[in-house]
Image (spheres, rainbow, N blue to C red):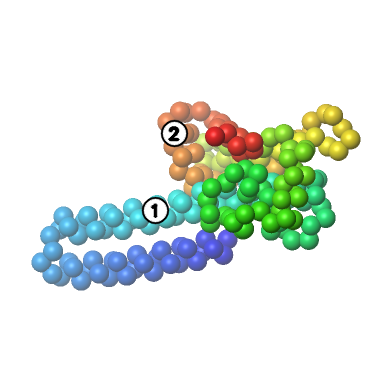
Amino acid sequence: MKDNKQLLDSLLAEMERAIGQLRQDLKSDSSFTNLMDQFKLLLATGISSLEQEQELEQKRQVLNHIARFIKEKVAPNQDKFDIYLSAAYFLCREEDERLQIEETPSQKTQSVISAAEKCLIAVKVHYEKLNDEGLYSRKTEIFYIKANDDKPSVMRVEEEINWQSLTSDIRDFFIRKGENKISFQVYPSQE
């Protein structure tokens, strides 16, 4: 959350600087169209940065759920949570380097990945509209086989989130399709 506030703070500072420049340009002979184009670009850049950060935060939260699952159910003997988080990153074949903890899996991370691959069946994330007031749920489902048990089990983490916290592609889906639910499989990777 602190990273989000820092990002917003730096975006606001950049916008204040750009708005100051636009005010100076207003006093000059710059054309109105040119000034409006600059202002639109400023807004679009700021919104794009915020949307990228929202998407990153959604991924981070899901990877945290997977890492907690691995720590609790699969390989509870590692001391640093980053090892589990890194394992989740590599298991889901995440490509966003801003979420990357290590460039290649360390020996400890690789042992956690190997243990997780033996029991993980699938990880799915479902977004569902709960009401018309902009409340949605994100349900992370982790399907796995317990040690000494042939029957699959599932761990679910359900959270309520608001419309503004959804990523732009998920909001677009709900608007365009008019459906109330969308699902993604994050493990095994669907490439």
| Residue positioned 40% across, 52% down in the render | 48
**Sequence-earlier tag: 1 or 2:** 1
x and y, in percent, of residue 116 in the image: 75, 43
Query: Which image quadrant is residue 137 in?
Result: top right
Q: Is residue 41 visible?
A: yes
Tag 2: amino acid: Ile
Q: Is residue 128 visible?
A: no
Query: Which image quadrant is residue 187 in?
Result: top right
| Residue positioned 52% across, 40% down in the render | 133
- Residue 26 is labelled as none
x and y, in percent, of residue 98 in the image: 53, 56
Tag 1: amino acid: Ile
For disc 2, the marked residue is 175
112, above or below 143, in the image: below
Between 177 and 91, the one lying in front of the other is 91
* In-image side of 167 versus 105 (left or right): left
For disc 1, the marked residue is 47
Q: Outermost residue, right direction? A: 148
* In-image side of 137 versus 143 (left or right): left
